[in-house]
Image (cartoon, rainbow, N blue to C red):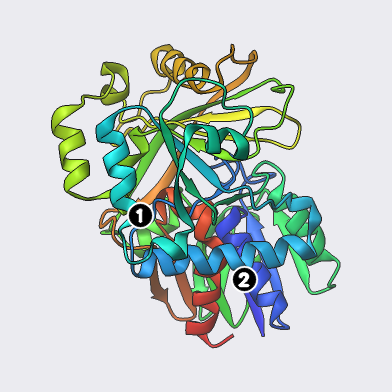
Amino acid sequence: MRVIVVGGGVVGTMHAWQAVQRGHEVVQIEREAEARGASLRNFGQIWVSGRAGGEELDTALRARELWERIGAEVPGLGFRANGSLTPVRTDREYAVAEAALARPDAAARGYKLVTADEARQINPALRGAFEAALWCERDAAVEPRTAQLHLREALRATGRYAFLPGREVREVTGPGAVRDDHGDVHRGDAVVLATGAWLSGLVRELVPDLPVRRVRLQMMQTAPLGERLTTSVADADSFRYYPAYKSPALDALDAGQDQAPVAAAHKMQLLMVQRQDGGLTIGDTHEYEHPFAFDTLEDPYEHLTGVVEGFLGRPLPRIQRRWAGVYAQCTDTTRVVHRQQVADGVWLVTGPGGRGMTCSPAIAETTANELGW
């Protein structure tokens, strides 16, 4: 079988991976010289802890298993089973963490509520003030800026994969066939459009009423910390954002403990991961109303700096990079992904939202199973 994958981000690359692993030939087409969207502008987190139960959690857990397996084959991914800690500082925050432990799927997530001293044994870099922390053993991380590069190297080594950058697919010309802006037609037994947040052009023509929206966020990256941050770190604002924490305790938190004004205005949470070079990737904000602002704002960065320094008990290293990114999210946020046949032999796979990096291996596996690859 010959598979055409349109899109060079992590969702597209994982579809290419699934097809090649199953013995097929793949041509992957990317409109930029390299993928530049949300697949690079993220934390690299394999984030199980906050996922909703049912299909979303099942998908995340399966993806976590696949990431570990692929990471063993492709060491350049930098896969590490680092887990995560969410420090809590108030009784209301503690109650939300405690309620999470009562979930029937808590064991599958690897939840444990630990004291501040136990948290510091797990992650000695957390020298700041907090009362306890929610530990999630199943969380993990990879290197987002280089993951696609290393995956493609491994794919090329099979002799059944080609990557064609700098080509925008403009038209479906027939069953399993597309034409790019160079005038070349690419024919296969199946075409997967994994175009991420690029929802205009061909995607809009094929699905004018696509139930997917775009979300913008701001992030930053620091100079090396100078010590290991052994886990990913979140703050209690993440309880308000992730569906796994819905409970009467969360309702009480929302009613009785306001977010900081900047955090509330920008729909913020802290997520933080250390990169292999020692720097910290820190975010994030959420913006849903179009048109998006073209500039980044400083207040959210100042807020995040204060939260991180409070947990670390030390000044944050110098910020080296700031950026904004845009990802595609199903308007029905309970859906893991929007997967739709849009033409004969052509499928669109988009809208995983902030779950793209986490869930992409399992999303691609499901596509391959459903299409009978």
**Residue 139 or 92: which is nearer the viewer?**
92
**What kind of residue is marked 1?**
Leu
**Residue 248 or 130: which is nearer the viewer?**
130
Mark earlier in primary sequence (2, 1) = 2
Q: Is residue 361 above or below residue 9?
A: below
Q: Which residue is mark 1?
A: 101
Residue name at image x 41 percent, y 16 percent:
303
Q: Is residue 69 above or below residue 317?
A: below
Is residue 256 shown left or right of residue 118?
left
Is residue 236 shown left or right of residue 161?
left
Residue 264 seen in the current view:
yes
Q: Is residue 360 above or below residue 304?
A: below
Q: Position of residue 346 (x, y in %)?
A: 48, 74
**Residue 230 or 180: which is nearer the viewer?**
230
Q: Quadrant of the N terminus?
A: bottom right
CA neighbours of label 1 inside 10 A, class few (<14), some (14 to 19), many (20+):
some
Residue 200 seen in the current view:
no
Secondary structure of the residue carrying tag 2 is: strand
**Total residue callouts:** 2
Secondary structure of the residue carrying tag 1 is: helix
**What kind of residue is marked 2?**
Ile
Q: Position of residue 213 (x, y in %)?
A: 32, 48
Is residue 141 shown left or right of residue 48?
right
CA neighbours of label 2 inside 10 A, class few (<14), some (14 to 19), many (20+):
many
Q: Position of residue 223 (x, y in %)?
A: 69, 20
Q: Quadrant of the C terminus?
A: bottom right
Q: Position of residue 2 (x, y in %)?
A: 67, 80
Residue name at image x 70 percent, y 72 percent:
26
Q: Which residue is mark 2?
A: 4
**Which disc is residue 313 wearing?**
none
Which mark is nearer the camera, 2 or 1? 1
Q: Is residue 320 above or below residue 286?
A: above
